[in-house]
Amino acid sequence: MFLINLQGKESIYEQIRSQIVKFIETGILKPNDKLPSVRSLAQDLGINPNTVMKAYQELEKNGYIYTLNKKGVFVADNSTEKSEVHKRDALNMLRTLKEEGFSKNDLSLLLEEVFEEETC
């Protein structure tokens, strides 16, 4: 399933991560499909389990997968999981701008500008 280039410029964990994202985006992996365990995938690829764990952690942080204790790692339903991640990121960005002194009016003007770009 995975093609890893041990001599490539891209790190092994990034190769795993990007391939899983590609499999999800192309529909090869569907919501709630079970992924190989960290230990199993590491053994199959002949790599350190920490490398697989790093890829899985990043994928989970970005809403692509989720872990159920003692059950395994599964593909997330991107339609809900990813939108929640984007909402959280947007809220964090807005909080940061507020802390940096942007007023509610400033933020409203920025939003208007973004939405005007879509109609042009």
Image: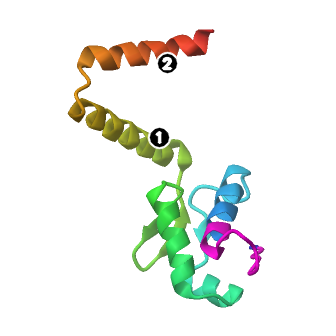
Magenta stretch secondary structure, dominant: loop
**Foreground: disc 1 or disc 2:** 2
* Amino acid at dot 2: Val
Q: Which quadrant is the C terminus positioned in?
A: top right
In the rendered image, the vertical position of residue 82 relative to residue 56, given as above or below: above
Give the left or right position of residue 52, taking residue 86 as reference. Answer: right
Q: Earlier in the sequence, mark 1 or mark 2?
A: 1
In the rendered image, the vertical position of residue 81 relative to residue 74, given as above or below: above
What percent of the width, then of the height, locates residue 27? 72, 52
Residue at 43% across, 46% down:
85
Per the model, the C-alpha gap separating discs 1 and 2 is 19 Å
> Between 36 and 119, which is closer to the camera in this rendering?
119
In the rendered image, the vertical position of residue 91 relative to residue 30, given as above or below: above
Find out whether residue 99 is within the magenta segment.
no
What percent of the width, then of the height, locates residue 16? 65, 70
Please provide the residue range marked out in magenta.
3-15
Checking the image for residue 114, the label placed there is: 2
Q: Which quadrant is the N terminus positioned in?
A: bottom right
Q: Which residue is mark 1?
A: 83
* Amino acid at dot 1: Ser
- Badge 2 marks a residue whose secondary structure is helix
Label total for image: 2
Residue at 52% across, 62% down:
59
Find out whether residue 13 is within the magenta segment.
yes
> Between 105 and 19, which is closer to the camera in this rendering?
105
Give the left or right position of residue 92, taking residue 78 as reference. Answer: left
Residue at 24% across, 30% down:
98
What percent of the width, then of the height, locates residue 69? 39, 75
Residue at 44% across, 59% down:
61
In which quadrant of the rendered view does residue 106 lie? Answer: top left
